[in-house]
Image: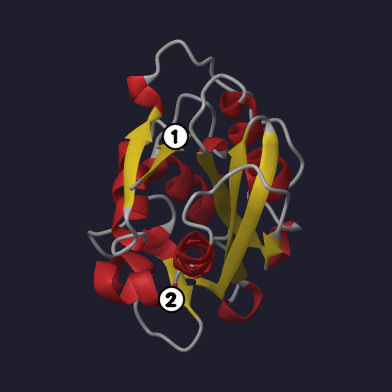
Amino acid sequence: MLTLLLATRNPKKVHELRRLLKGVPVRFLTLGQFPDIPAVEEDGKTFRSNALKKAMIPSRSTILPVLAEDSGLEVRALGGAPGVRSARYAGADQDDAGNVAKLLKVLKKFPRSQRQARFVCSMVLAAGGKPIGIFEGSCAGWISFSARGKTGFGYDPVFIPAGRQKTMADLGPRLKDRLSHRAQAARKLKAWLRANPSAGPGGSRAAR
């Protein structure tokens, strides 16, 4: 069985990634079990550049393949914001609720026709300091006028996927796992892992 190090300390993200990768013979460890691996500054300008950095740097400190993910929300009317700053949109000391509150305030006067948005996810698998797989997904939709729903995390309570009437947080995990940006990237990763069960450092491959 392959062992992967998930390069995150976010328990909600760990839980979702484990659920999305269910069925693949993989054992997961997290950064919480490797306190000596330093934190990585997420200063990239794109989700991919952040994911690459978060995967490659820890992979230099362990023999394990490292899986990192960077994702967030892009709102068209805001020029793609909050983008790579999605988790820190309302400030470094704020939580999901604070970020959602700020987004709703900024978009308060925008009509439905100007609230288009999309979730974007970039996953990178690295070994020995080099990327060996890049897997990406996106989910288009729009921002609701108020927060609704009790599942999910991040901006799920205000994001309504295209063709749906409920927010991602209202749809529940089963339907979310069919539609989300992270689910799309995870499906590509699962296919890659099945084709490359050793996940060795045998060169870079991208899946969009």
Q: Secondary structure at mark 2?
A: helix
Q: Visible in this render: residue 85?
A: no
Instruction: Identify the amino acid type marked 2.
Output: Leu
Marks 2, 1: nearer the viewer: 1
Q: Visible in this render: residue 174?
A: yes
Q: How many marks?
A: 2
Which numbered disc covers residue 168?
Answer: none
Q: CA distance from mark 2 to mark 1?
A: 22 Å
At 54% from the left and 63% from the top, the residue drawn is 192
Residue to which mark 1 is pinned: 8
Residue to which mark 2 is pinned: 179
The 10 Å Cα crowd at callout 1, few under 14, some 14 to 19, many 20 or more, is: many
Of residues 174 and 150, the one drawn nearer to the viewer in this rendering: 174
At 37% from the left and 45% from the top, the residue drawn is 13
Of residues 83 and 200, the one drawn nearer to the viewer in this rendering: 200
Q: Secondary structure at mark 1?
A: loop
Q: Residue furthest bottom?
A: 163
Q: Position of residue 186 (x, y in %)?
A: 47, 62
Instruction: Identify the amino acid type marked 1.
Output: Thr
Does 98 appear above or below 203? above
At 65% from the left and 74% from the top, the residue drawn is 114
Does 32 appear above or below 14? above
Of residues 126 and 114, the one drawn nearer to the viewer in this rendering: 126
Q: Position of residue 74 (x, y in %)?
A: 64, 59
Tell me which corner region of the image, top left, top right, bottom left or bottom right, holds residue 57: top right
Of residues 80 and 101, the one drawn nearer to the viewer in this rendering: 80
Q: Quadrant of the C terminus?
A: bottom right
Q: Position of residue 54 (x, y in %)?
A: 60, 33
Tell me which corner region of the image, top left, top right, bottom left or bottom right, holds residue 169: bottom left
Tell me which corner region of the image, top left, top right, bottom left or bottom right, holds residue 157: bottom left
